Amino acid sequence: MTYLVYVGIAIGLILNFYVVKRLGKGIMNIVFISFGMSLLLVGLAMAFVAVYESRLQDISFHVFWHSIIYLAFISLIWGGYRIKKNMESANPEGFNVKDTVLFANMLLWSVFIFVIAPVVDQSLYSMLTGSFVETIGLHHLIAFVLGIIGAWYLFYIKGGPQAGKSMRFISIYLLFLGIQHFWEIINETLHLLPITGETTELVEKFIILGAIIFFILGQSAVIKFIKGKN
């Protein structure tokens, strides 16, 4: 299942790259670049899990990988915000220096998390064990709320004829990612279901794979729209 998720991420990024390339420097490119950045960050979060899951204390591990996921959600929300501003502006702008700086910082922060995680693992574990963050699963809750709010926001924006072909699918993609963290709240924080950790993780991967399928459908819808215009 993990390999299927990785393959899905690769396919989604390839399709997204094609869309961005076809759009060129138009004002719509910002929203699709933000889509690609989001999926890339999801891929980095999964890579972090693969590298550190058995090497870090549980609470430290979860706080770190969720920090990368937050950036993936924020990337989508930012793209939605930018396209909404463009639709309302008399002088709309495509991908610009401000966007470059934001996304570059997201990538740098994600790489920094990979570097700093083992260094501060024990300190963070000592600080957070038994704390409010661990007790209520705050790291899961933040991701869930960001996913739900972000999905609603993207669906609300719609994004015009080009982005609109993709926006609904991307809204569902983000909704699925939010649901994944709700599943973690149920089973990792509250332990409401009598299932093993392996089953919990397997269901998570199915949810992530479902999210990526909707991402791919979103890119495919735009490609079909672009080809239909030619």
Image: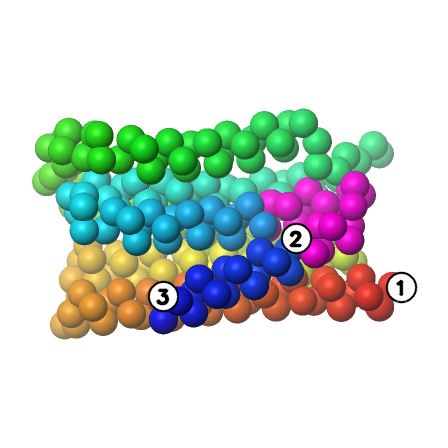
Q: Residue at x 78, y 65 (%)?
A: 225
Q: Point out the image quarter for the N terminus.
A: bottom left
Instruction: Give neighbour class at mark 3: few <14, some 14-19, many 20+ (Cα, 10 Å).
Output: some
Dot 2 or dot 1: first in sequence order is 2
Q: Point out the image quarter for the C terminus.
A: bottom right
Question: Is residue 137 part of the magenta span, yes or no?
Answer: no
The answer to whether one can see residue 84 in this image is no
Q: Position of residue 132 (x, y in %)?
A: 18, 39
Could you say whether the residue bearing mark 3 is in a helix, strand or loop?
Answer: helix
Q: CA distance from mark 1 to mark 3?
A: 38 Å
Residue range corresponding to the magenta coloring: 18-35
Q: Please tell me whether mark 2 or mark 1 is closer to you in this view.
A: 2
- Res. 17 mark: 2
Q: Residue at x 31, y 70 (%)?
A: 203
Give the amino acid at mark 3. Answer: Thr
Q: Which residue is mark 3?
A: 2
- Res. 39 mark: none
Could you say whether the residue bearing mark 1 is in a helix, strand or loop?
Answer: loop
- Res. 230 mark: 1
Q: CA distance from mark 3 to mark 2?
A: 23 Å
Could you say whether the residue bearing mark 2 is in a helix, strand or loop?
Answer: helix
